Amino acid sequence: MTTASTTITIQNRLGMHARPAMLFAEVAGKYTAEITVGHAEADPVDAKSIMQLMMLAATQGTDLVITADGEDANEAIDDLTTLVRDCFNE
Amino acid sequence: MKLMDIVVKDAIIPELQSTNRDGAIAELVDSLVAANCVTEDQRDDFVKAIIRRENKGSTGFGHGVAVPHVKHIDITTMHIAVGNSPDGIDFKSLDGDHVYSIILLLSPEDQPENHLDAMEAIFSSLSQDTFRRFLRQAKSPEDVLTLLCETDNAVR
C-alpha cells in the first residue's frame, strides 16, 4: 500500500467552484486509491465526491492538502496536482 | 454563511409547475422577480445565463438535487430560490436520476469568496440524507423555512 500526499495552492480567481470541483472529482475517480482533500479550516473530505468538495469553500490562495492511499496513490497525486496547478483548465 | 440570510422567503415553490429543466429554472427566476429581487429587465438575461451554465455541465450532482447558478455582473446581492418537483425533472444529472429539489443561486460576479461560502452552506445541507428527504417532502414555504432554520442552527 502506498500513501502519497502533497500541498498545493489554489491559484484561479474563482477558487474551487462547481466546475473545478466536478473536474477534480472526475480525475480522482479514475484512481482506485482512497483520496481525501482538506485545508487548514476544513476537515478532509472525499476527493471523489463533488458535494463534499464544495463543502471546502476553497478560495483563491487556499492551501489544499491532498492525500492518497492505495496502489496508484502517486499517480493520483501527480494528476490532481497538475489539475490544480493548471487552474482547472479555466 | 447562513442559508436563511440568502434564501428569499417569497421565492420558495413547493410544487413547481414546470416538468422540464429550463422551465423550472425560468419559474424560479420568475419567483425572484415577483419577490422584487430581480427586475423584469434582468429576467431573460439571468434565465439564459443559468441555462448556458447548465449546458456546460449539469449541476445535478446526484441524489435528486440540483444547484443551478450564475455569477452575473448585474447581480448585487446573493439570492436563493428553492423549488420542489413532485414528479421529478430530467436535469441530465451525473447519476442519471431525476431531480426533485432545486436550489437556484444568483451571485454577484465580483464576489467569488461569497459564492463559495454560499455553496458551502448549500452543500453542507444537501450532503445530508435527512436534509434532502425533508426538503423533498416539504409541502409549503413554511416547511422549507423551518428546515433551513434548523439546519442553520445545527452545529456543522
Image (cartoon, coloured by chain):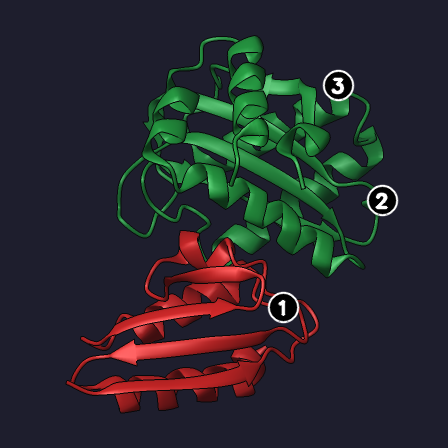
Q: Is residue B133 left or right of residue B135?
A: left
Q: Position of residue B44 (x, y in %)?
A: 72, 38
Pinpoint the chain carrying mark 3. Answer: B
- Label 2: few (<14), some or many (≥20) within 10 Å? some
Q: Is residue A12 left or right of residue B95?
A: right
Residue A15 disc label: 1
Q: Amino acid at mark 2?
A: Thr
Residue found 57% across the figure and 68% down from its top: A40
Tag 3 residue: B34
Nearer the viewer's eye, disc 3 or disc 2? 2
Q: Secondary structure at mark 2?
A: loop
Splitting the image into 4 quarters, where does residue A4 fall? bottom left
Pinpoint the chain carrying mark 1. Answer: A
Colour seen for chain B: green
Q: Position of residue A12 (x, y in %)?
A: 65, 77
Closer-to-camera residue (A63/A75):
A63
Q: Image height check: is A35 above or below B15?
A: below
Q: Amino acid at mark 1?
A: Gly
Q: Secondary structure at mark 3?
A: helix
Q: Image height check: is B78 above or below B152?
A: below
Splitting the image into 4 quarters, where does residue B101 fall? top left
Chain whose colour in the figure is red:
A
Q: Is residue B110 left or right of residue A44?
A: right
Residue B76 disc label: 2
